[in-house]
Image (cartoon, rainbow, N blue to C red):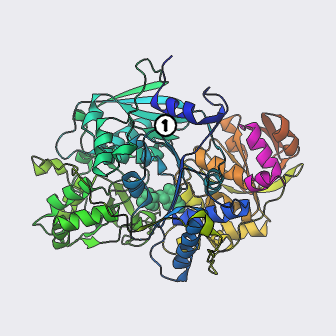
Amino acid sequence: MGLTIAQKIIKEHMLSGSMEVGCEIGLKIDQTLTQDATGTMAYLEFEAMGIPRVKTELSVAYIDHNTLQSGFENADDHKYIQTIAKKYGLYFSRPGNGICHQVHLERFGIPGKTLIGSDSHTPTGGGIGMLAFGAGGLDVAVAMGGGEYYINMPKMVKINLTGKLGDWVSAKDIILEVLRIMSVKGGVGKIIEYGGDGIKSLSVPERATITNMGAELGASTSIFPSDEITREFLEAQGREEDYIPLASDSDAVYDEVIDIDLSAIRPMVACPHSPDNVKSVRELSGIKVDQVCIGSCTNSSYVDMMKVAYILKGRTVSENVSLSVACGSKQVYNMIAANGALADIIASGARILECACGPCIGMGQSPNSGGISLRTFNRNFEGRSGTKDAQIYLVSPELAAYSAIKGVLSDPTELGCEPEIKLPDKFLINDNMIVPPAPTEKAGDIEVVRGPNIKPFPKTVPLEKSIQAECILKIGDNITTDHIMPAGAKILPYRSNIPYLSKYCFSVCDEGFSERAIKKNGGIIVGGANYGQGSSREHAALVPLYLGVKAVLAKSFARIHAANLINAGIIPLTFANEDDYEHISQGDELVLSDIKNDIESKDTTDIFNKTTGRSITLNLNLSKRQRDILVAGGLLNYTKGD
Ligand code: MIC
Ligand code: SF4
């Protein structure tokens, strides 16, 4: 039987397990990346492991999230990460060099290699044929130390693209169409591979827009073949030697096949507050717009920006709209500055931001109260923009730029014929903002600089025989890590300070949660389906751990968050019968009377609801390794053998 692209890369990198769907497999990881908002924690964890030098082929530490620097905290974290990188053998991408995923694609991504990153959009690398996963910081720390990265062997989905996109319809519209078809839960437990004749007209950055937002499908990752288009991109980046061809076998078997005709796709919009709430622009045309933001790791490539500049050229941003533009990397900024396109963008009245995550994670540019904001980003979760009642719509750069001019949500196909804007034959290459590590023999001389914002991570203790605790929060379906541990300009600077962060845990949905958790000495959380979707931030597990959360009961979990809970020593449990979700209320007294023994030896456990007198069966969908981690009280204890 033939293999899919992902199966081929897995086969080459598999160190343990078997390729049967659902089995836990351990992968050798070739490359890692971190960003600053998750990086400090990951490096504290790496330091705790006591390994003198990273053991990967390449590890890069990026600074792109926490760049507002409204106090000393961000700059302290940057210094910490910079000195860690120098000492332990990592490349350091300085603030100002760009968003991790965009820069990694341009300068480091290699087809056929494995990559994990402490950011959920790491699958962007799938655009260049990498097998790339988003992971918690601790998993990245382990991989940097040469340890395996574990996932459950996913199912294989093929998305067959045929035909060609029409004028002013773009890669963003393809992935929005996929989200419309599959939903934010549709990719769970699956790797999505793109193929078919339609991919021949998609450049690497366009492919990366699609694999980037595979994270919003809940997919383990997404991948494109490595073909002539990949080779041309690598050549234009001066890295032709990194090219290898990569394709699935003609008799590869997929668990699911979806056909999409590109010529039938129209410009799309993901409406508030979920990336799968997708409608055609025609249904929404005319909605008055207050703000437009162009950028983020999804849509900030050279061609994206050239199209935006073309639309804005000689026009003025509507007087009721605030337009912000941020390129994804210094390379893109340099190129559009050199060819004059940036001047066209500036002349239109756009507000130019540094190449960083910025508004995508609520770091500035929060919309006005109840404001309508069109964004070329990948997430429109409630409150993520920093304005609680803002309405965020996710759109393509073309639709964003045209709507900014018109002042209302508008269909870019009205612009008529699209000019051909192609990738350059040669990108402008200047890696002066990437600092190499110190040679091994000099590493000992480097002092790691630790500012006062950096606090140790919470202690975990080995699992006790039984757990008796109150249900301190009951919430519904599709709870995101932005609900559990919000980000934004006010909180994000404290990512290295779990005690401070804990005040904001669940503040989006329940202002009193943190105080209640402390008062009750922790407890149990009950959630619905797809609990913990969205970002990879392990803070959404470490902060509940700090607040004494012992277990989370849910209908189902998002992959990365479930792994983060286990790494933190918090037990993820699913209802054997989903209807039992109704039989626990906030405030109920719950007892897991034999939890340690059940985790060690069973696939289910019973929870007794003392308040109602009912017993409920819960599934323990755990590998042997995960069971051992939980019993040890988290991955750090387990790794240290405590
Ligand atoms: C996001 O897009 O939600 C983030 C911010 O990049 C996160 C990482 C974080 O919370 O630091 C992610 O995607 O993992
Ligand atoms: Fe940054 Fe937004 Fe991309 Fe996350 S999704 S890495 S916050 S640009």
Instruction: Give the main secondary structure, helix, strand or loop, of the magenta stretch.
Output: helix
Toward the bottom, the furthest residue is: 71
State which quadrant residue 19 falls in: top right
Left or right, 148 with respect to 127, comes to right
Q: Is residue 641 magenta?
A: yes
Toward the front, the furthest residue is: 441
Q: Position of residue 372 (x, y in %)?
A: 33, 63
> Which range is magenta?
620-642
Total count of labels: 1
**Label 1 neighbourhood size at 10 Å, few (<14), some (14-19), many (20+)?**
some
Q: Up-down: is 443 above or below 153?
A: below
State which quadrant residue 349 falls in: bottom left
Q: Position of residue 219 (x, y in %)?
A: 50, 40
Mark 1, secondary structure of its residue: loop
29 or 476, nearer to the observer: 29
Left or right, 4 with respect to 614, comes to left
Q: Is mark 1 within 8 Å of ligand 1?
A: no
